[in-house]
Image (tube, helix red, strand yellow):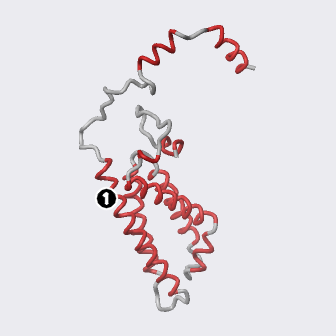
Amino acid sequence: MTYLSNIARPEGDPKVLRSGPSSLGSSDQLAKGLAWFSLGLGLAELVAPQRFTKALGMQGQESLVRAYGAREILSGIISMSPDKQIGLWSRLAGDGLDIATLLSALREDNPKRDNVAVALTMVLGVTLLDLVGAQTTTVRHSQHRGQRRLYHDRSGFPKGLAAARGAARNFQPSRAVPRLAAAAE
């Protein structure tokens, strides 16, 4: 998760070195689960769109399913970023597209109409989760408009300034030189 969350981190923001389970609230855990769901579904839609179109009686719409897969992957990556609420709201917008597409396949002449109804029910359920996730995450992580992030209380040193000063005082170049020479080889 650390590497994915740093992909969409704005320039100048501190990078995530590590985080533990206690740092994730329930809205963050829901966002993480929905992000992984997006990545998995998007990959499946990119790799095997014909399986989706055949199951739903929508043959010939493989390009559309691939585009939806790319959208899912992008939403999943953004949902894992520090600005996860943007990814969750984009998932919700994507759900609207999915619902509209499935409604168009819910025709009387579609032999897979029952499958479309099941898929529509599943998308509606995920839409509800996306709505809850987007709302709760937005409340938890929103900054007030115009308010800048303040880092005046942070030193940039994970163990504090005193430990950093002590490390500099205890630095022995004779120990570092062999390591540097070995790394250069």
- Tag 1: amino acid: Gln
- Give residue 12's position: percent from left, percent from top: 41, 31
As displayed, is residue 151 above or below residue 4? Answer: above
Instruction: Determine whether, in the image, residue 16 is placed left or right of residue 185.
Output: left
- Residue at the (42%, 25%) spot, across then down: 156
Front position in the image: 159 or 140: 159
Which residue, given by chain and number where applicable, does mark 1 sit on? 135
Q: Where the C terminus falls, by quadrant?
A: top right
Q: Residue furthest bottom?
A: 108
- Residue at the (42%, 67%) spot, across then down: 95
- Give residue 77's position: percent from left, percent from top: 49, 51
- Residue at the (57%, 67%) spot, across then down: 63
As displayed, is residue 65 above or below residue 117? Answer: above
Label 1: how many Cα within 10 Å (few below 14, some 14–19, many 20+): some
**Label 1: which secondary element:** helix
Tell me where residue 155 sits by quadrant.
top left
As displayed, is residue 163 above or below residue 75? Answer: above
Front position in the image: 178 or 8: 178
Tell me where residue 173 sits by quadrant.
top right
- Give residue 128's position: percent from left, percent from top: 37, 69
